[in-house]
Image (cartoon, grey):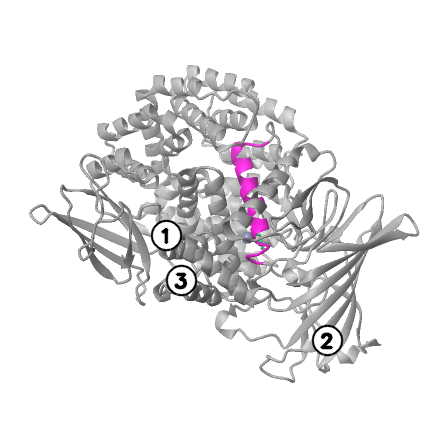
Amino acid sequence: PKAVLLRDYTPPAFLIDSVDLDVDVREKQATIRSRLAVRRNPAAKDAAQPLVLDGRHLELVSVAIDGRALAPGEYTVDEDHLRIAEAPAAFTLEAVVRFDPWANTRLEGFYASKDGLFTQCEAQGFRCITYFIDRPDVMSRYTVTLHAGRERFPHLLANGNQVAKGEEDGERHWAKWEDPFPKPSYLFAMVAAKLDLLEEGFVTRSGRKALLQVYVEPGKIDQAGFAMHALKKAMRWDEAVFGLELDLERFMIVAVGDFNMGAMENKGLNIFNTKYILARPDTATDYDYYGIDKVVAHEYFHNWTGNRVTCRDWFQLTLKEGLTVFRDQEYSADEYSRAVARIQDVRDLRAYQFPEDAGPMAHPVRPDSYVEINNFYTATVYEKGAEVIRMIYTLLGREPFRKGMDLYFERHDGQAVTCDDFTQAMQDASGVDLSGLRRWYSRAGTPRVTARGVYDEAAQAFTLTVGQSLGQGGEPLHIPLAVGLVGPDGVDIPLRLEGDAAASGTTRVLDLREAEQQFRFVEVTARPVPSLLRGFSAPVVLDGGLTDADLTHLMTHDSDPFNRWEAGQVLATRIILAGVEALKAGKPMEVPTAYVEAVGRILASASRDPAFAAECLALPDEAILAEQMEVADPDAIHEARRRLKREIAERYRTRFEGAFRHFTVTGPYSPDANAAGRRSLRNASLGYLMAIDDSTARALTFLEYRRAENMTDTMAALECLANSAGAERERALGMFYEKWKDEALVVDKWFRAQATSDLPKTLDRVKSLLAHPAFDLRNPNRARAVLHAFAGTAVHFHAADGEGYRFVAEQVVALDRINPQIASRLARAFDRWKKYDAGRQAHARGALESIRSAEGLSSDVGEVVGRALG
Ligand code: B3K
Ligand code: ZN
């Protein structure tokens, strides 16, 4: 398959104004009759182009133009297209196609899950339902009539409003839906299933009435309430913060157990992975609740940023995704703790996006080319894309940003547009020059920023010299660098740049627009420690040139909570990486007292903000540490990190035991920030105690496992035990499975806890899990709980003997025959193979080559493996 290039974009030759689908569901077969109102696009480059419709895995029964059936010579069909050479200027095209949704294991298009039939069309699944010009700049009005057996498929749903329904002979029924909004085909959805329904009314800010519905697997209505609650909160938030209201009479969410990603924002009919809907205190953790809240909000927010204004082409994906992630991040920051939300977002960015940007799949937030678009739903497009929006927000300020959003909707409502259209609206509404900021859209890689401060005591001036590099030439980026100066007393110094009339504020956003720039602060009465990149104001790697003593100072005093956390992370990273070198040289690992004491201060003041304290106690992830090394050594990283944790645990054992008791949450369960924060600190304390892993710690953890009444505490204990060699491990795992074997999402947790265990022989365990009766490679959540989870472990996937690589490669190939999108994600585990030593590299290369030579490899996996080897 050839690469598609951004620079080759041309407008579509034809437009489709309306789509009328008739869907007939029978045993092992769906028949789709389409009626399309087609006309030549006046904006097309060439007025004589043939009509080319996309279509895959379809059996074409008949095709007609304006009621006249086409003879075989008048069209051609291949694997991907239906071509009609002679097409009039405007006409009705009718096609009848057939396929078997139960045989569709790719879960793209129209497919079967346990309780019925569901769709997934983004990015290019609509072409697996009918022949169509399947690209987002073709927007149409849809009418859909579904027919199916009443008993098996009591609910027949599609986008928009139900306009008619009725009975048919032979226990069948039908329903007709009309979506009043023109939309691209990727937002099409339909469902024919047996489900339970939770519904509530909602009155929008301007007084419009809407019906909200959440459909779940029969018997699980007691797990749907939080999703409904989250939906209503998100709707209120979007009204208050962006002035955006629901534009529909009915908003439906349907949860399905077989789903390739998290959720999908189809117009008026969101379809969700059950993982992001179902929750009950005893089945879902605080983190699950947080995820549900965020994803429900994210998909709802797409109704404006994505659906009302959509993307011209798939290169513009970040237009809707980066912006909508930014919106869901802000929502979460408002609903929970802003500091903790920011810390978690940055940790994820560093764990997933930075490695992506440094590896073979690196691409700009607006990619220039792709082979398989599904491979570009990445951390770069989503999370780095959100950081780009956040930088615009930081540069403009809240009010001007809101004006920019208003202008964007005013100009582009109902259109399919580009990232440039968005930045133009922001620039026009605010008057802020965004030329340097726009370059972020076309550059891959993580910029490095270096900063060095010099204090001139005589002049009472502090000069900061800041440089940026991205290592590929090109003009410098515009980088907003938020800074503060922390005095020796720990108090922020008021900031006055040379040339300012007066000092203003204690945090200042510096505009770094050049390769190197100097900023001179005056009236600085004592040597400060610069607090750089406050709130992580840009997605860069910072070298701040600070000493351990500077960092300890910031860790204790910085008024910016993000940088307080960050200082601790940088210090811990230094200690662990020095430990790695010491271990390799056979020397003892040193843990500086100043750091340990700073950790002690966090513990001592933890009750001020338990959730934040828990974040500060979490040591940097092994994946993030590996990125810091020239040649990553996963075993040494694991060992050094483990020793640091154990040393802290031994030093503060009594305090951790105290915190574990003190932060107990009483009363009925609630996933709110306060209660979740207390649990988070309590379970972080348990994690430290289990780093000691003696019989006292194990007994405490096992007792906690049995005592726990909510899934957060249960899983915290189970995960600790899964990493421990004690007899409690198998007892707890056995009890857990017995109790939860009928609850799929909980069983996924059971699989995951074992697949990610630190213990030796984890690979053997994973292999035996594949033979477990509950394992099913066709279910993406289950596959991810075992395979993707294992492939994300630092130690076992990267085992020096290559067994981890070989195993995952075999599974990629097996999975590819079932579901290329899920296989391709698994193959991404190899992305950083060149970061390891020669021995590991040889094993990884062999594994990658074995994937590449597999017969009938999908273009999804082919692209990922080809780039890795290329
Ligand atoms: N837009 C979907 C993702 C579709 C992925 C297609 N492979 C969910 C989301 O980002 O909201
Ligand atoms: Zn999205």
Whether the residue under disc 3 has CB within 8 Å of ligand 2 = no
Amino acid identity at mark 1: Pro
Residue sitting nearer the eye, 765 or 347 = 347
Residue sitting nearer the eye, 554 or 690 = 554
Amino acid identity at mark 3: Ser
Q: Which mark is residue 76?
A: 2
**Distance from the alpha carbon under mark 3 to that under mark 2:** 52 Å
Is residue 305 shown in magenta? yes
Does residue 26 show up?
no
Residue sitting nearer the eye, 706 or 265 = 265
Residue 298: % across, % down? 55, 48
Q: Which mark is residue 539?
A: 1
Residue 704: % across, % down? 51, 19
Does residue 558 show up?
yes
Check disc 2: other Cα within 10 Å, few if <14, some if 14-19, many if 20+: few
Residue 433: % across, % down? 35, 65
Hey, which residue is sitting farthest front in the picture? Answer: 207
Q: Which mark is residue 179?
A: none
Which residue is drawn at the image coordinates 22% and 49% (left, top)?
503
Q: Quadrant of the C terminus?
A: bottom left
Magenta span: predominant SS is: helix
* Range of magenta residues: 284-306
* Upstream in sequence: badge 3 or badge 1: 3
**Distance from the alpha carbon under mark 2 to that under mark 1:** 49 Å
Q: Secondary structure beneath disc 3?
A: helix
Is 601 situated above or below 805? Answer: above
Check disc 1: other Cα within 10 Å, few if <14, some if 14-19, many if 20+: many
**Distance from the alpha carbon under mark 3 to that under mark 1:** 23 Å
Image side of residue 77 versus residue 638, left or right: right
- The residue that label 3 is drawn on is 430
